[in-house]
Amino acid sequence: MQRRRAITILCHSTLVGFATMALSACGFKLRGAQNYAFQTLAVLPQPGGALAQELRRSVDASVRVLAPGEALTNAQVVLDIVQEQREKSVVGVNSSGQVREFQLRLRVKFSVRTPQGRELAPQAEILLQRDISFNETAVLAKEAEEALLYRDLQTDVVQQVLRRLATVRLD
């Protein structure tokens, strides 16, 4: 019995070792901390919506985010959130016309510039979507699920914007 367990553990260890070697051989690497080419950032509009506030909280500690009301000239880079739009559309109905599935979308348009107006990155749009089933007997639970999905979409957008900010160069 102990011999069988030892062989099973050895096989599992060997498989994990081979998987690790295969992943490292293909160039797989965990995403590390972002390196930004600037030390100060202004996020507009101030104070902005939930997305702008999460962006301010999520920026790396090596970058100082300007406080609302602080002079824009103190920033090296300005992130303009041009549009933040939440959409909800019906994508599925049953035979009697009752809604069975919605699609939630979060559309964000933004641009990156210097305080003097020089464009560092052209206006870009991020569009994320998630499908959610609907059941009229569990409306409150589905509303809570919808709020969680929108929060998840927002976090996803923030991470994508931060990765794009890491590619911005000031030269």
Image (tube, rainbow, N blue to C red):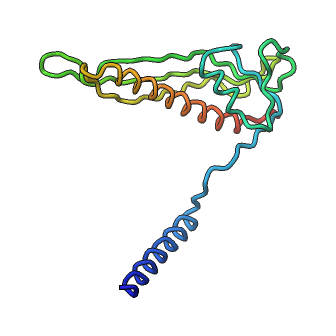
- Please, is residue 169 above or below residue 147 in the view? below
Residue 95 position by quadrant = top left
Which quadrant holds the C terminus?
A: top right
Question: Residue 14: percent from the left, percent from the top?
Answer: 48, 77
Q: Identify which residue is drawn at 44% across, 77% down.
A: 9
Of residues 97 and 168, which is closer to you in this image?
97
Task: Count every numbered label the image shows and give the total.
Answer: 0
Question: Residue 26: percent from the left, percent from the top?
Answer: 55, 64
- Please, is residue 44 above or below residue 62 in the view? above
Residue found at the far front of this picture: 1
Question: Residue 131: percent from the left, percent from the top?
Answer: 35, 29
Of residues 42 and 77, which is closer to you in this image?
42
Q: Identify which residue is drawn at 29% across, 28% down.
A: 133
Which quadrant holds the N terminus?
A: bottom left
Residue 143 position by quadrant = top left
Question: Residue 39: percent from the left, percent from the top?
Answer: 83, 33
Residue found at the far left of this picture: 95
Residue found at the far bottom of this picture: 3
